Image (tube, rainbow, N blue to C red):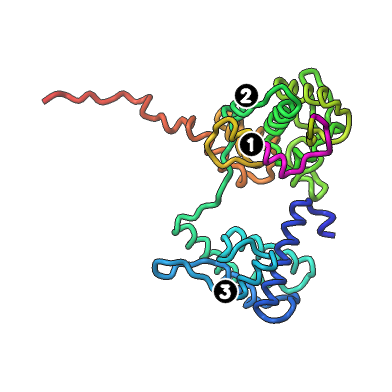
Amino acid sequence: MFAEAASANTTRSYATALRYWAGWHVGRYGQPIEMPLPPSCVIQFIVDHLARRSGETLVWELPPALDAALVASKLKQRPGPLKLPTIVHRVAVLSSAHQLLKVSNPCDTTEVRQLLAKARRAAHKRGERPSKKTAITAHELRAMIKTCDEDLVGMRDRALLFFSFASGGRRRSETASARVENLTHIEDGYLYRLDVGKTLQDGVKTGGSPDKPIIGEPAQALRAWLHAAGIQQGPLFRQLAHGRVGGALSPKSVATIIQNRAKAAGLAGDYGGHSLRSGFVTEGARQGIALPAIMAMTDHRSVVSVIGYYNAGAAEINPAARLLEGDSPTQVQPE
């Protein structure tokens, strides 16, 4: 039931987390995992994988032999502790599994919550911050667009960049799954009906309108690509090989196109699939667009999740930073 309701990316991440839990549990306790787990098991998992400072070094409790076995079985990418966001995610996945099974949830105990809270505070004191992709605002987008030639690859990438940004900063999975059938012609371009995304996983649209306008240059670029590629139905953005148009791009391919175009434009930063999304919000704030209007395009459910990008973009135009410009400077009298 969960796999049917969730997105493909979410299903994969949950499956990966649960496989890891199962492998770790066998190695740690010598027996298969069985729910409900006791809170002590969850605490042991956190302590095993969480780096903490001891003197001048960081230590963790995962036995080296078990660590090596998890890496050898490809449940773990590399030896050593896990990053705090990964630990939090895997505890959250285990919590969801217990909720679905309607059994006592060990992740919801005071001990587990307090341990994770202390871990967050410790990580913050060590200077660890969540890593975010560099935002692609209008300036960066224009630079990337200039790298796109007039061949099929260039036309596709130009249309993809414009579409992903102008339609509200689409996630890479949303861009990869975009289809011709969801386009409606309007006077200045298109309306694109978004029917795939995180806000649609429960079957109820909770953000703005599902119709996202694509007008002006983005519409022109999209129209040129579709005409040149002869695409009349199916996926909007396709693989290209030796001048031939193939199947739909994968979400990973979308991210790779963004990274390659940023590199070709000589942009410094860590760019990826999320860069256009954060850049759309940041640019909107810089241009003074109201937060509700931006959220109607991005389909963010929570103000909390979008406000960081919005504040970053609005910081440089914050009128409170110019209080002294309206003040008459005091004249200093010479002695």
Whether residue 30 is situated above or below residue 270 in the rendered picture:
below
| Residue 57 relative to residue 75: left or right | left
Q: Label 3, on which residue?
A: 64
Residue type pointed to by label 1: Asn
Q: Separation of disc 2 and disc 1 at Cα?
A: 13 Å
Q: Secondary structure at mark 3?
A: helix
Q: Quadrant of the C terminus?
A: top left
Q: Quadrant of the N terminus?
A: bottom right
Task: Farthest residue to the front: give it.
Answer: 242
Q: Label 2, on which residue?
A: 146
Residue extent of the magenta highlight: 243-260
Mark seen at residue 321: none
The residue at the point 79 percent across, 45 percent down is 200
**Residue 191, percent across and down?**
79, 28
Mark seen at residue 260: 1
Residue type pointed to by label 2: Lys
